[in-house]
Amino acid sequence: MTSIGEAAPERSATNDAAADVLRGHVRDIQDWPQPGVVFKDITPLLSSPAAFGVVIGAFADVARERGATTIAGIEARGFLLAAPVADRVGARLVPIRKKGKLPGPTRGATYDLEYGTATIEIHADAVGPGERVLLIDDVLATGGTAAAAHGLLADAGADVVGLAVLMELSFLAGRERLGAVDIVTLLTI
């Protein structure tokens, strides 16, 4: 449960490179989407094939190390990260979407936000017992979305082998909402 941004003897050169890339390819947008919020914009990362490749490589290493057979990405920026990881490691891809965005039968989880509630969904047949799922998103903030996504996958019988995120906003204590979930963070802020 160590962050790549933290000192740890097991850090690899790939992980150090991913943390360095993120420091140089994420910009802060003040007061977006509302006053007082500092949004972590990853579009500079996405616009650099070399930088993007470094972080996808780091996530692919995590997926391989944990024997992931399925990669699940949380809407919307998690999709951008999960899809190339799934392709690189030869795993299935499962999108976790906002309510009402998936066709056919779905399973949903509702969770609390600062200003209300939200619901995310997966297809009812998206995962099953025995699948080893790595959950991917861009930012771990308060942990509500990640906890709901983890619950959806686990309730379907999947073995969630971890949550991998580009950045963890440690001051929001999202890790605490996730209990025993193994979290890999490329950069802790």
Image: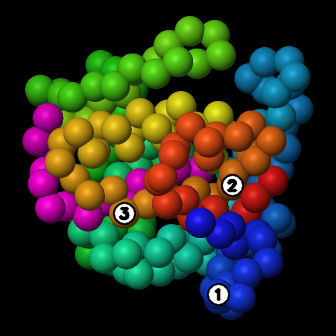
Disc assigned to residue 167: 2
Q: What amino acid does circle 3 point to?
A: Val
Residue for point 73% across, 63% down: 187
Q: Is residue 125 visible?
A: yes
89 in relation to 27, above or below: below
Kindly report which numbered mark, 1 or 2, lies closer to the viewer in this rendering.
1
Tell me which segment is drawn in magenta.
124-138
Real-space Cα distance between discs 1 and 2?
A: 19 Å
Residue contact at pointers 1 and 3, CB within 8 angstroms: no
> How dense is the environment of label 1, judged by Cα within 10 Å: few (below 14), some, or many (20 and up)?
few
Real-space Cα distance between discs 1 and 3?
A: 19 Å
Q: What amino acid does circle 2 point to?
A: Met
Residue 13 highlighted magenta (yes or no): no
* Relative depth, front residue between 40 and 186: 186
Mark 1 or mark 3: whose residue is earlier in sequence: 1
140 in relation to 143, above or below: below
11 in relation to 123, above or below: below
> How dense is the environment of label 2, judged by Cα within 10 Å: few (below 14), some, or many (20 and up)?
many
Figure quadrant of residue 107:
top left
Residue for point 19% across, 36% down: 123
Element type where label 2 sits in the image: strand
Disc assigned to residue 105: none
Element type where label 1 sits in the image: loop
Q: Name the residue under label 1.
A: 10
Disc assigned to residue 161: 3
Element type where label 3 sits in the image: strand
* Residue 47 percent across, percent down from the top left: 66, 60
Kindly report which numbered mark, 3 or 2, lies closer to the viewer in this rendering.
3
What quarter of the picture does the N terminus occupy?
Answer: bottom right
Mark 1 or mark 2: whose residue is earlier in sequence: 1
Q: Can residue 101 be seen in this view?
A: no
